[in-house]
Amino acid sequence: MSSIDPHPQRNTIRLQLKQNIVLKDMPPQAWDDIEPLLEIADFGKGDLLVNQGHGAMEQFFILDGILKRVVSDPKGKEMILRFAAETDMDTSYAAWRLHTPMPYSIVAVTKVRVAKLSMQQWVSFLDRHSDIKAHFEYEVMSLMSEVMAHTITLHLLDATGRLSRFKRKHQELLARIPKKELASYLNLTPETLSRLKQKIK
């Protein structure tokens, strides 16, 4: 892990951060406030960023790669709740506010680079910048609504409908997510997913 200023790719990282859905409209003084707090971290495919049930919580801004939220039952069966890629974020904010353990894990689907900070640092930053806090909380609500809509979709749409909806809403991710991961998200077998992709083409 590294802070931004000494990082050899600091100029690229700063440009990437300024495209992030939460950070892109921040005024210069807010950038001056947050940049020293951010750590740049690289993760390999399958690496765990946050563990379900734990109390360690962080805020992630995705610079490169794809993350997923995953919830596991006591028997180890997993359900993927969402994917997130460049310009997006993932967060432990709701659990932090509710004083509960993490209800899901955050895992790297591909190689991933993120800018991150502890939830305590992020909440303190938001408390100093009310406009950014309002925008961030709106994005958190949108994210939660997206997860809920996906869960409902698994029950209401058939396999073709589930894939078509994902293609419509996340076309840019369709070719980047490994087949096994996407099949799991859509509650399909990899073989069924392959057949449906050919059929929809």
Image (tube, rainbow, N blue to C red):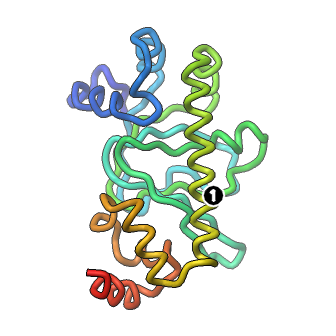
Q: Is residue 113 above or below residue 160?
A: above
Query: In this orientation, which residue lies closer to the viewer: 161 or 138?
Result: 161
Q: If the image is split into quadrants, where does the C terminus sit? A: bottom left
Residue 105, picture quadrant: bottom right
Q: What residue do we see at 51% from left, 45% from top? A: 90
Q: Is residue 71 left or right of residue 190?
A: right
Q: Is residue 120 left or right of residue 45?
A: right
Numbered disc 1: secondary structure: loop
Return the x and y of residue 145 as percentages of the image width and height: 62, 53
For disc 1, the marked residue is: 104
| Identity, as a three-letter code, of the amino acid under mark 1 | Tyr
Q: If the image is split into quadrants, where does the N terminus sit? A: top left
Q: What residue do we see at 34% from left, 41% from top? A: 63
Query: In this orientation, which residue lies closer to the viewer: 83 or 167?
Result: 167
Residues packed near mark 1 inside 10 Å, few (<14), some (14 to 19) or many (20 plus): many
Q: What residue do we see at 64% from left, 43% from top? A: 56
Q: Is residue 94 left or right of residue 139?
A: right
Residue 129, picture quadrant: top right
